[in-house]
């Protein structure tokens, strides 16, 4: 269990990490999700002890480790770049943490062989890292992190520099390898899809602040605020500022629909309405209350079995994700429907007022 | 047809001529070293008419000659070891840490190379005379550090900055102590940089004459000084001088061979 208590980091008057408190549980993936420069790496470096926090304390298993040298901590880390010792063989690269802690020759050999077996590195042990492919190099780095059996494992976008197929493969392997372990695993990523695939818990970051922390699916389906919803959405969220007045919800761009169902109880005010691209439909769904709008096609992206329609809906730039091939002429007009239960509604401060239910 | 062939050969002819011109002085030196002084001063000849090894024999048997080489090699070796071992930690600090005035200090190091060595000849001479270091190998080696440490720091800093800092961090995360990381992991990674830095130290120390000559008299007299003396006192011993010159080229050529693949990076101070 890694606990961050009011940790913050300021460098030269610039806030890199705003005051953050997190409790990361062992045995599950703890995901840091956020765009580049949102502070994922800094937060990880603080957790590892590679950097010291400006304020706050860091506890690991009830023990205060703030200021403890990284050498004395029980931590392992994998970087986004493939970091290995270029002059040492794969075997020595993996054995490095064991050599540092002075294990016996026999023990080192046994543990290196075991980890190399898991990560399919057994035939490559005699080679140098430069003679390996990118995926194999990253496997060596992961093996070095695993062989140490550290109680805190930090993975900083470990799959970003790999090609698509390898990424999928290695992600599966990571899930398997860590499944039976009691380590606290922290995984940083910019990709919402990857966060959902890994499961566990997710902390969403925005400009150095954690906006929400909780079980990954909960954070995805019921974000606490607009920033979290935006961070955890790819393609981006479809948003519109709407005003509820009487029985109608409308804005001066011409979007308007009846405030039926759950929206009835909404107080009269100005809100940000948002829906995910896969909730923006091209045919009317069977639902008690449906919002309707007309949009103009800007561009159609066809990605295999899916299409992404980039639309101009009354001046808003929206995206509709469909699970079929749809090809339209530019500027073609289409009807769009949203089941009003799928709306996420945020008040003027960005707090969530309503979010779709999930099971 | 004939002109076409001439044009086709031109790209090969130009570098060939260039290399021939470059090699003429070296050839002439080697040529002279196998001649007797009388032949050198006599009629013009492209190669030795009376081939002789007497000049070399004299150098290898006469202690005043071969001690010159030993002295030079001694202070050059001491200087190279001193410069590189002092520059390694300094370069690491410049490459990895930010501290007050680091950029100014780094630049200031280089300004040491901007003054001619003659400027330092007098202070070194006076200082070493008064503390009893005059005419020792270590005196010349230390004096040459003034130029070579800044150079080695700059070269090594370039090579070190090419190594991602994450390697250092990974080593610390693995649990290695700093000395162990530095010696077992870091130094092997920048081995080529150390080779290049050592080469440059060797080269500057080997060719530097003024300080080496000023700070020595008998015990640590460098070969270059021996060569100039011979020319002035014992009349014209041109053959002997040429043989000494030829032998002086050899160590440099040998060292260059070992770092030939990294030399360009070295001239760019490791920043390629």
Image (cartoon, coloured by chain):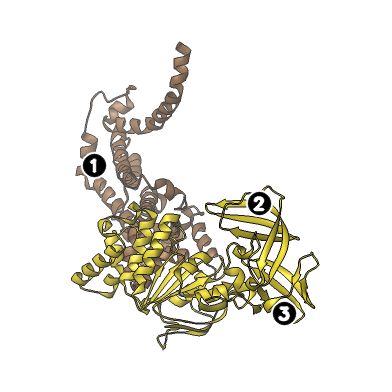
Vertical order, A12 against B204 (above or below): below
Q: Nearer the viewer, mark 1 or mark 2?
A: 2
Q: CA distance from mark 1 to mark 2?
A: 86 Å
Chain name for mark 2: A
In terms of depth relative to the viewer, which is nearer, B240 or A339? A339
Please indicate, yes or no, whether residue A45 appears anywhere in the rendered image. Answer: yes
| Both labels 1 and 3 in a single chain | no
Vertical order, A327 against A153 (above or below): above
Q: Nearer the viewer, mark 1 or mark 3?
A: 3
Q: Chain B's colour?
A: brown
How far from the left and from the top, in percent, is residue B5?
Answer: 44, 16
Q: CA distance from mark 1 to mark 3?
A: 108 Å
Vertical order, B64 against A81 (above or below): above
- Asked if disc 2 and disc 3 are in contact, CB closer than 8 Å, the reply is no
- How would you rate the neighbour count of disc 2 (Cα within 10 Å): few for under 14, some for 14-19, many for 20 or more? some
How far from the left and from the top, in percent, is residue B267?
Answer: 45, 48
Q: Residue at x 41, y 88 (%)?
A: A62
Q: Which residue is mark 1?
A: B59
Q: Which chain is yellow?
A: A
Q: CA distance from mark 2 to mark 3?
A: 35 Å
Image-based side of A15 in relation to B179, left or right: right
Determine the secondary structure under disc 1: helix
Q: Which residue is mark 2?
A: A299
Q: Nearer the viewer, mark 2 or mark 3?
A: 3
Chain name for mark 1: B
Upstream in sequence: badge 2 or badge 3:
3
In terms of depth relative to the viewer, which is nearer, A37 or B34? A37
Determine the secondary structure under disc 3: helix
């Amino acid at each position: 269990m890694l606990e961050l208590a009011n940790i913050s980091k300021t460098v030269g008057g610039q806030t890199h990490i705003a005051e953050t408190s997190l409790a990361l549980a062992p045995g599950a993936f703890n995901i840091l999700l956020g765009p580049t420069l949102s502070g994922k790496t800094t937060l990880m470096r603080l957790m590892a002890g590679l950097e010291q926090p400006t304020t706050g304390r860091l506890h690991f298993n009830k023990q205060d480790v703030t200021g403890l040298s990284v050498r004395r901590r029980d931590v392992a880390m994998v970087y986004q770049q493939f970091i290995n010792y270029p002059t040492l063989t794969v075997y020595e690269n993996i054995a490095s943490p064991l050599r540092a802690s002075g294990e016996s020759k026999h023990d080192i050999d046994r543990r290196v062989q075991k980890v190399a077996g898991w990560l399919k590195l057994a035939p490559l042990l005699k080679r140098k890292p430069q003679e390996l492919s990118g995926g194999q190099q990253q496997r060596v780095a992961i093996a070095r992190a695993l062989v140490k059996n550290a109680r805190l494992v930090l993975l900083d976008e470990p799959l970003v520099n790999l090609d698509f197929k390898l990424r999928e493969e290695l992600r599966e392997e990571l899930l398997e390898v860590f499944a039976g372990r009691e380590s606290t695993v922290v995984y940083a990523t910019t990709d919402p899809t990857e966060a959902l695939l890994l499961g566990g818990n997710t902390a969403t970051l925005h400009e150095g602040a954690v906006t929400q922390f909780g079980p990954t699916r909960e954070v995805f389906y019921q974000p606490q605020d607009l920033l979290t919803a935006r961070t955890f959405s790819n393609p981006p969220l479809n948003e519109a500022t709407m005003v509820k007045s009487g029985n109608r919800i409308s804005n001066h761009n011409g979007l308007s629909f009846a405030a039926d169902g759950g929206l009835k109880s909404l107080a009269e005010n100005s809100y940000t309405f948002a829906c995910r691209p896969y909730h923006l439909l091209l045919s009317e769904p069977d639902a008690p209350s449906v919002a309707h709008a007309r949009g103009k096609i800007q561009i159609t992206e066809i990605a295999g079995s899916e299409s992404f329609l980039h639309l101009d809906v009354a001046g808003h730039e929206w995206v509709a994700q469909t699970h079929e091939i749809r090809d339209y002429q530019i500027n073609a007009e289409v009807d769009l429907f949203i089941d009003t239960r799928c709306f996420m509604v945020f008040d003027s401060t960005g707090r969530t007022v309503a979010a779709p239910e999930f099971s | 047809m004939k002109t076409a062939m001439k044009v086709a050969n031109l790209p090969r002819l130009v570098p060939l001529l260039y290399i021939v011109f470059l090699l003429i002085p070296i050839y002439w030196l080697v040529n002279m070293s196998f001649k007797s002084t009388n032949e050198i001063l006599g009629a013009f000849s492209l190669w030795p008419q009376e081939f002789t090894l007497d000049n070399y024999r004299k150098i290898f048997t006469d202690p005043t000659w071969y001690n010159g080489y030993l002295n030079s090699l001694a202070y050059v070796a001491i200087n190279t070891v001193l410069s590189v071992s002092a520059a390694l930690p300094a370069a690491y600090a410049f490459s990895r840490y930010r501290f007050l005035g680091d950029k100014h200090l780094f630049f200031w190091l280089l300004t040491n190379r901007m003054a001619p060595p003659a400027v330092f000849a007098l202070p070194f001479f006076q200082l070493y005379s008064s503390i009893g270091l005059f005419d020792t190998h270590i005196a010349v080696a230390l004096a040459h550090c003034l130029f070579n440490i800044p150079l080695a720091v700059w070269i090594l800093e370039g090579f070190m900055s090419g190594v991602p800092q994450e390697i250092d961090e990974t080593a610390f995360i693995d649990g290695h102590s700093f000395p162990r990381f530095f010696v077992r992991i870091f130094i092997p990674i920048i081995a080529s940089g150390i080779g290049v830095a050592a080469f440059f130290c060797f080269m500057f120390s080997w060719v530097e004459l003024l300080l080496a000559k000023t700070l020595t008299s008998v015990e640590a007299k460098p070969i270059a000084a021996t060569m100039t003396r011979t020319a002035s006192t014992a009349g014209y011993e041109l053959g002997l001088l040429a043989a000494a010159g030829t032998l002086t080229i050899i160590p440099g050529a040998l060292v260059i061979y070992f770092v030939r693949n990294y030399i360009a990076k070295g001239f760019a101070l490791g920043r390629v």
